[in-house]
Amino acid sequence: MDWSNIESMDPNLLVGVVNTALRNHYHSLEELCKSHDLDSERLKARLAEEDYEYLPAANQFR
C-alpha cells in the first residue's frame, strides 16, 4: 500500500486499511504513523471528516 496517498483515498477504504494494519501489525497509531512517515494528527483529521474517531483503548477508528 502506498501510504502517501491518504489525502485522495476514499475515507471508508482508508479506515479499513488503517484498522487492519493496527490490528495485525501495530500496537498504536503512533507506531503505525512512525513506520510509514505519516502525521498522526493529519490522519486523524482526514478520518474525522467522515466522523471516524481513533479510540486508543481499542487501537482502532470507529
Image (cartoon, helix red, strand yellow):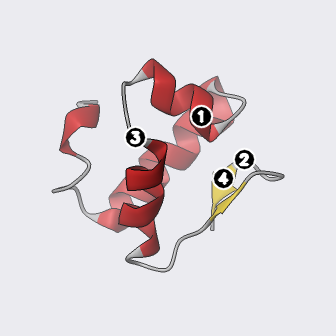
- Which residue is found at the position 49% from the left and 80% from the top? 51
The kind of residue on which mark 1 rests is Glu
Asked if the residue at tag 2 contacts the one at tag 4, i.e. Cβ–Cβ closer than 8 Å, the answer is yes
Q: How crowded is mark 3: few (under 14 residues within 10 Å), some or many (20 or more)?
A: few
Disc ID at residue 59: 2
The numbered mark, 3 or 2, whose residue comes first in the sequence reads: 3
Q: How crowded is mark 2: few (under 14 residues within 10 Å), some or many (20 or more)?
A: some
Instruction: Give left or right: position of 7 versus 30.
Output: left
* Residue 21: quarter of image: top right
Q: Position of residue 19 (x, y in %)?
A: 56, 48
The kind of residue on which mark 3 rests is Asp
Closest to the camera, between mark 3 and mark 4, is 3
Q: Is mark 4 on a helix, strand or loop?
A: strand
Asked if the residue at tag 4 contacts the one at tag 3, i.e. Cβ–Cβ closer than 8 Å, the answer is no
Instruction: Give left or right: position of 56 versus 26.
Output: right
> For the N terminus, which image quadrant?
top left
Asked if the residue at tag 1 contacts the one at tag 3, i.e. Cβ–Cβ closer than 8 Å, the answer is no
Q: Residue under circle 3?
A: 39
> For the C terminus, which image quadrant?
bottom right
The numbered mark, 3 or 1, whose residue comes first in the sequence reads: 1
Q: Residue under circle 1?
A: 30
Task: Report how far apart the C-alphas of labels 3 and 2 lie in the structure.
Answer: 17 Å
Q: Residue under circle 4?
A: 60
The numbered mark, 3 or 4, whose residue comes first in the sequence reads: 3
Task: Report how far apart the C-alphas of labels 2 and 1 lie in the structure.
Answer: 10 Å
Q: Residues within 10 Å of mark 4 (few under 14, many from 20)?
A: many
Q: Is mark 2 on a helix, strand or loop?
A: loop
Q: Is mark 1 on a helix, strand or loop?
A: helix
Asked if the residue at tag 2 contacts the one at tag 3, i.e. Cβ–Cβ closer than 8 Å, the answer is no
